[in-house]
Amino acid sequence: MNLINRVAIVGGSHGNELIGVFLVKKFQKNVNLIIRSSFQTLSVLGNLKAIQENKRYIDKDLNRCFHAYGLQDNSPSTYEDLRAKEIHQILHPNNQTGVDAIIDLHTTTSNMGISIILSNQHPFLLNLGAYLSTINPLVKICVHEQPKFSGFLRSICNFGIVVEVGAVPQGVLHAELFQQTEQVVYAILDYFQASNQGKTPKTSNILTAYQSINIVDYPRNEVGEIAAMIHPQLQYQDYQPLHPGEPMFVTFNGENIIYKGESTVYPIFINEAAYYEKGIAMHFTQKQEIHL
Amino acid sequence: MNLINRVAIVGGSHGNELIGVFLVKKFQKNVNLIIRSSFQTLSVLGNLKAIQENKRYIDKDLNRCFHAYGLQDNSPSTYEDLRAKEIHQILHPNNQTGVDAIIDLHTTTSNMGISIILSNQHPFLLNLGAYLSTINPLVKICVHEQPKFSGFLRSICNFGIVVEVGAVPQGVLHAELFQQTEQVVYAILDYFQASNQGKTPKTSNILTAYQSINIVDYPRNEVGEIAAMIHPQLQYQDYQPLHPGEPMFVTFNGENIIYKGESTVYPIFINEAAYYEKGIAMHFTQKQEIHL
């Protein structure tokens, strides 16, 4: 029995992350690129209005709108609540089998290279992560476990996969990262196809994965305004170890603020533009060796 | 007689270019940093509403609103037309002497390092450019001549100076570029002070300057949509020579589009996010040696 019968590739969940937008447009014009014989593949543009306006979102972040309660709401009050319902309906039509996997295409202003964020630790996903990092050792695998229908698009199916590439500014195309994202999408589809055909690719038995442990905000002043910047020694150092006592931030007057934790962490999403308003300067992760 | 009696430092003409915004806030809290004995210095936040909303602009680009006709319009129809009039009034109050120089702080997603854009070729400005590139050889000097009141903020005074730093995404603080911008501002103020005191710093007799010659748009399809990306070989190569026959763009299908001009040019503002909507993929410049 096939594990994967239906797959969705989504670009432009954030309207100003152009690589996903233009890649999905390419797939929609050239469907043969994403057709595999053992399953059906949809390609979907996410936040249509925000794509048109070259913004992350209109009213609120679409990628936080896939909650069970929101999707059941019959009178959504924002554009994104409405669009989340529409996308859910496309991916899980009434009385039909929904998608088994979602490949959600994102970019980040952080220096995360080619990152894959897995929605859970199902062996099928972990093995996919090992496969992707075997064929391209620069690919990094993150695990950010979320319950089903937790708000994230990737949470509304069994196998949620985010392709997160950077550093690229919002509203900018970056040819090399575009091409690398495209190759990762094909590799994922090929993995699904091989798996359905009982020929799951052999990989290393050990997966290096970065597990989200917590978020860190910027230092702020008494009125909540940012009071320090990412330290130059930490800027662009996503996935590198941050040891206790090393600088994290520098104030506008040049004073260093150090990391006071007790154990080494591996920050990611360092200085992501869209996270300023969310109160996130970076995510801390732990580096793990997972035995498959 | 002093050449410089009044100077304005403006940050946030574009609301999501955070380095200028936070630097002006710093100057407003610590005015001693920008006080020089021989002239008065104002520090002004540009597009207040856009800064609050972390956008480039609300209705239209403020830095194209400083036209004589707009500034004389008694019923401005957009927020930026109104704000341009307000800024003009702050910088050139009725019946008082206006500012002689404007230092307008910007960031770009292009890899332009520390760039200084001069509004004209007055010997005083060219000598300033030579001084700044002498004390920091990484500083690049551009000349983009504009008639007075041509729409740009820098065009409403005798000595218009843009500090343009990158690569930095919109909506992002970058500590190293923040500190470098700050040092350039002090160097400009110190140059004005020395000049007023008859001690204009000695510099090299030759200034290397990049003179804007024309703009280049992205290749577009029949409905005007972008059809190719900046080529990986050109990405981040601001100020480097582009020779006839070298690749400029790559289509989404991987075909190269080459530069078909007859002479070598030096592109800047390569892949600037805010210029997609203006139909600008880059500016071509000529590299010139100006004898002072």
Image (tube, coloured by chain):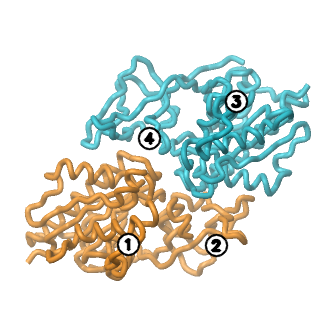
Chain colours: A cyan, B orange
Q: CA distance from mark 4 to mark 2?
A: 42 Å
**Other residues around mark 4 within 10 Å, as few (<14) / some (14–19) / many (≥20):** some
- Per the image, the residue denoted by label 3 is A129
Q: CA distance from mark 4 to mark 3?
A: 29 Å
Identify the residue at horizontal 74%, vertical 47% (top origin).
Answer: A44
Which chain does the residue under circle 4 lie in? A
Identify the residue at horizontal 26%, vertical 68% (top origin).
Answer: B102
- Per the image, the residue denoted by label 2 is B245
- Name the amino acid type tagged 1: Pro
Q: Position of residue B230 (x, y in %)?
A: 60, 62
Circle 3 or circle 2, nearest the eye: 3
| Residue A276's disc number | 4
Q: CA distance from mark 3 to mark 1?
A: 56 Å
Circle 4 or circle 1, nearest the eye: 1
Q: Position of residue B112 (x, y in %)?
A: 43, 60
Q: Are marks 3 and 2 in contact (CB under 8 Å)?
A: no
User: Could you tell which of marks 4 and 3 lies nearer the N-terminus?
Assistant: 3
Circle 3 or circle 1, nearest the eye: 1
Q: In which image quadrant can residue B150 be found?
A: bottom left
- Name the amino acid type tagged 2: Gly
Q: CA distance from mark 3 to mark 2?
A: 41 Å
Q: Are marks 4 and 3 in contact (CB under 8 Å)?
A: no
